[in-house]
């Protein structure tokens, strides 16, 4: 008996279709497995590259580096990952960039670097000029201090005697006849900024009214330049230098973040907010009720002897008017041996510096410093009288400065840490 079995073409096509689907699914599964493994390896490698960049930044903090120098090495646990550390300056702040790469994968981190204080920060370092420090009024010093061999004593100014139970709320040690030296790279950078010809080979932009400019530190630096630069209704953020051959004026309607100001004279009007670096040859004036965030730096360095401007009005070189808050660093530098009967830095009533003051001449402190004061001497100007090495109604307190703070770089100090990560 013969069986005539006929299979319809549609059924055969259906079987082939199902087979094709199964083959595609199998191929897709194999491809997904491969992609999953591939991206798993890429992810692990990327994480490793990021970790190596972090490690390299931390490693470099214990290594002395010059401006423009780089450290080049391979990762210990993965020799195929190449790491390079580069040091530059942004304003007066040390800037380090850590870059880790493998083939076409690259990751960079850039940060400002400052001094670390693993054992805490002294409240005061007063140069020993063979005269005691005299306290009067509501003055209060909290934290360890370095004082002249003649020590510290109570005094009286305009009938206001010292009114605290202790002279110093901390340990006392004898100071040196010289101030601690700042980092040489820092000093060279200040000179470079004040003497550089900014007209050469710079990417100059025109500042338009109410302009907003944001520039990443991964891009080329932008420059705004004029004889007098008045910043009004502007927002300037990041990798930007503002240079004036005569004067920079910052109005309260302007917001600055991380930018650098360079001019002989810099005027910060009342109620300005933001954070920036201001470097001047003559003076910096900060108006009332300004709030300058971390890491703001205000620097005045006088010209060498014979070139400096004669100060007939006894106007301070760095002046903080009333109710100003500065989170960062104030530096006045003058290497001349000329004496002075006026303050080079004046901190007015109600003003607060959360950070450090370094003054190579006289400081008049009527406000508060939460951090450290390093100075050649104090001065008090009251009722037409001048009181040398008197601290009157000022407060210095190093005990409440946040441990995250990092600040002025000193010579031969190995302890450094990240001040701020950049963008």
Image (cartoon, helix red, strand yellow):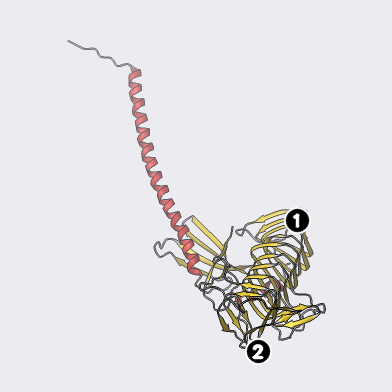
**Which residue corresponds to the image point at 51% horizontal and 61% vertical from the top-left?**
99
Residue at the (78%, 67%) spot, across then down = 247
Given the current orientation, which residue lies at the most extreme right position? 312
Rendering coords of residue 269 (x, y %) = 77, 63
The picture quadrant where one finds residue 384 is bottom right
How packed is label 1: few (under 14 Cα within 10 Å), some, or many (20 or more)?
A: some
Give the CA distance from mark 2 to mark 1.
48 Å
> In terms of depth relative to the viewer, which is nearer, 74 or 253?
253
Q: Which residue is at 45% across, 55% downward?
A: 47
Quadrant holding the N terminus: top left
From the image, tell me which residue sits under label 1. 253
- Which residue is nearer to you in this view: 239 or 152? 152
Q: Are marks 2 and 1 in contact (CB under 8 Å)?
A: no
Which residue position holds label 2?
130
**Circle nearer the viewer, 2 or 1:** 2
Q: Position of residue 190 (x, y in %)?
A: 67, 73
Q: Is residue 141 left or right of residue 227?
A: left
Callout 2 secondary element: loop
Q: Position of residue 30 (x, y in %)?
A: 36, 40
């Amino acid at each position: 008996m013969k069986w005539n079995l006929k299979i319809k073409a549609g059924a055969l096509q259906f079987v082939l279709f199902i087979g094709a689907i199964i083959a595609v699914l199998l191929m897709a599964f194999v491809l997904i497995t491969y992609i999953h493994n591939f991206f798993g390896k890429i992810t692990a490698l990327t994480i490793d590259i990021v970790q190596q960049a972090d490690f390299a930044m931390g490693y470099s903090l214990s290594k002395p580096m010059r401006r423009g120098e780089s450290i080049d090495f391979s990762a210990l646990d993965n020799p195929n990952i190449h790491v390079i550390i580069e040091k530059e300056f942004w304003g007066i702040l040390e800037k380090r960039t850590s870059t880790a790469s493998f083939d076409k994968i690259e990751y960079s981190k850039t940060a400002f670097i400052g001094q670390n204080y693993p054992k805490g920060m002294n409240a005061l370092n007063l140069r020993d000029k063979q005269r005691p420090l005299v306290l009067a009024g509501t003055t209060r010093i909290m934290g360890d201090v370095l004082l002249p061999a003649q020590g510290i004593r109570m005094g009286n100014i305009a009938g206001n005697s010292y009114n605290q139970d202790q002279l110093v709320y901390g340990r006392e040690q004898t100071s040196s006849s010289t101030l601690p030296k700042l980092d040489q790279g820092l000093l060279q950078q200040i000179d470079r900024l004040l003497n550089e010809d900014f007209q050469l080979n710079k990417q100059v932009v025109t500042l338009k009214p109410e302009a907003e400019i944001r520039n990443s530190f991964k891009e080329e630096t932008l420059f705004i330049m004029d004889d007098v630069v008045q910043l009004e209704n502007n927002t300037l953020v990041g990798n930007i230098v503002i240079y004036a051959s005569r004067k920079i004026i910052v109005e309260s309607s302007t917001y600055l973040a991380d930018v650098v100001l360079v001019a002989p004279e810099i005027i910060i009007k009342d109620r300005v907010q933001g954070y920036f670096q201001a470097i001047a040859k003559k003076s910096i004036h900060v108006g009332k009720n300004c709030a300058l965030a971390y890491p703001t730096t205000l620097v005045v360095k006088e010209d060498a002897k014979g070139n400096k401007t004669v100060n007939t009005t006894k106007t301070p070189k760095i002046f903080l008017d009333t109710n100003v808050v500065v989170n960062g660093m104030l530096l006045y530098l003058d290497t001349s041996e000329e004496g002075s009967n006026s303050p080079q830095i004046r901190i007015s009533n109600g003003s607060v510096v959360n950070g450090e003051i370094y003054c190579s001449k006289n400081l008049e402190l009527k406000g508060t410093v939460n951090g450290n004061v390093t100075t050649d001497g104090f001065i008090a100007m009251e009722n037409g009288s001048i009181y040398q090495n008197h601290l009157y109604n000022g407060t210095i307190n190093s005990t409440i400065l946040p441990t995250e703070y990092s600040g002025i770089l000193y010579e031969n100090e190995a302890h450094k840490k990240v001040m701020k990560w950049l963008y």
